[in-house]
Image (cartoon, grey):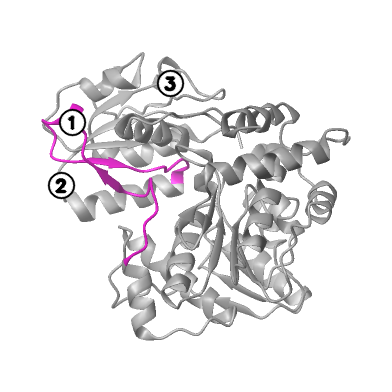
Amino acid sequence: MNYSEALDWLYSTQLFGIKLGLEGPRRLLREYLAFPPRNTKVIHVAGTNGKGSTCAFIDSVARATGTRTGLFTSPHLIEYPERIRVSGIKIERDEVALHLSALREMVTQWDPHPTFFEISLALGMKYFSERQCELVILETGMGGRMDATSAIPADVAVLTPIGMDHQEWLGETLTDIATEKAAIIVPGKNVISSNQLPEADAIIRQVANERRAPLTFAGEPLEGYALGLTGAHQQENAALAVEALHAAGITLNYETVKAGLSSTQWPGRFERVDFSARKDASATILDIAHNPAAARALTATWRSEFGNTKANLIFGAVEAKDIEGMLDALVPIAGHLHLVPVNSPRALAPEKLVAFLSEKAPAFTIHSTLESALESPSSLPSLITGSAFLIGEIKALHERAAHRVTTQ
């Protein structure tokens, strides 16, 4: 199969849905010889917010030390190879096609059939092994206990802030969700956690104690370093990353930490872009915030960067999210609100978003297309947020790239 044909097959596996469990991914990793070599360190990252940024900080600082890294994240924003990187470089399309062809031949008769995410994980891990990565950083897809990434033994577990999200899969309470995510803690292995809400804190301490896993809270923001990512919350993510690398046995010094943190890049996190379609605006900011906690952090970052200047807010979301909570957090910084569709099977129509607006909401416009919102004149800086799918679509428009939606 060529790259396009390989992706067609991979995307067809989304019909098998999301299957939480470890038996399938363990079999796939074992038979595809994709488990990491014993001398490869593995850092496993779970949490509700900040996973991607924390993974990016870990990867960048490790690379600054000369360590060869493998980074597995999801979802991608524009193109599939974003998910799998070696030393910061995306996997080549030819490699994707080669591995997916081999995987398709191997699993064609399997029942149950591996999912999109399980296949992607096997591809990534085999590629990391072939490239002799010394450190692998794995971001969970969802949860932790039954997430496919938990099939891989980790040397360090990292827990970013845990909040309410994916309740339909992980449970209706913060205690339920924290229990799922804290399950990535490996007996006897180091666990590094950010400061947590009381319910999540209690669960993490309990699980770490039961599993005799040394627990460190990296709760203090990392100050005195320039960061490549914007926002006060990123100082906490950076602190988490540095502690995780210490726990993994990576030798650090001031210069490598400084170089790694300052050069960290991660798309869709208070990302500034230059939109020719918005020449009248002073700035356009993209952020994938898709739950209330992330929206509150985004609002704080906006105020620190723009002061009292309001945002020309372009918002779209998918179903099964706390949209009211997100909008309540964002409305105080909005000068005008544009409600737009999202290119996702789970998208919520802009007309339905109106029901989630409070009386404090500013004037709003409902758009049938994202392009319509972008073309609306405004003297205010623009903020586009609400969904990773929306940010992927906007970045594809900006870069004139093909954009293919995934549910995983």
Residue denoted by label 3: 355
Q: Which residue is rendered at x = 19% and y = 27% of the image?
A: 277
Q: What element carries label 2?
A: loop
Tell me where the magenta segment starts and ends, as one range.
Answer: 263-292
Q: What residue type is labelled 1?
A: Ser
Q: In which quarter of the image is residue 244?
A: bottom right
Q: Earlier in the sequence, mark 1 or mark 3?
A: 1
CA distance separating discs 2 and 3:
27 Å
Q: Quadrant of the N terminus?
A: top right
* Circle number at residue 366: none
Looking at the image, do the residues carrying marks 2 and 3 touch, with CB atoms under 8 Å apart?
no
Q: Position of residue 230 (x, y in %)?
A: 30, 57
- Looking at the image, is 236 positioned above or below residue 48? below
CA distance separating discs 1 and 2:
25 Å
Residue denoted by label 1: 276
Q: Where is residue 381 in the image (x, y as percent from the top left)?
A: 18, 38
Q: What residue type is labelled 2?
A: Asn
Tell me if 147 is positioned left or right of 92 in this view: right
Q: Which of 72 and 235 is in front in this view?
A: 72
Is any part of residue 19 visible from this angle? no
Q: What residue type is labelled 3?
A: Ala
Is any part of residue 333 visible from this angle? yes
Residue denoted by label 2: 308
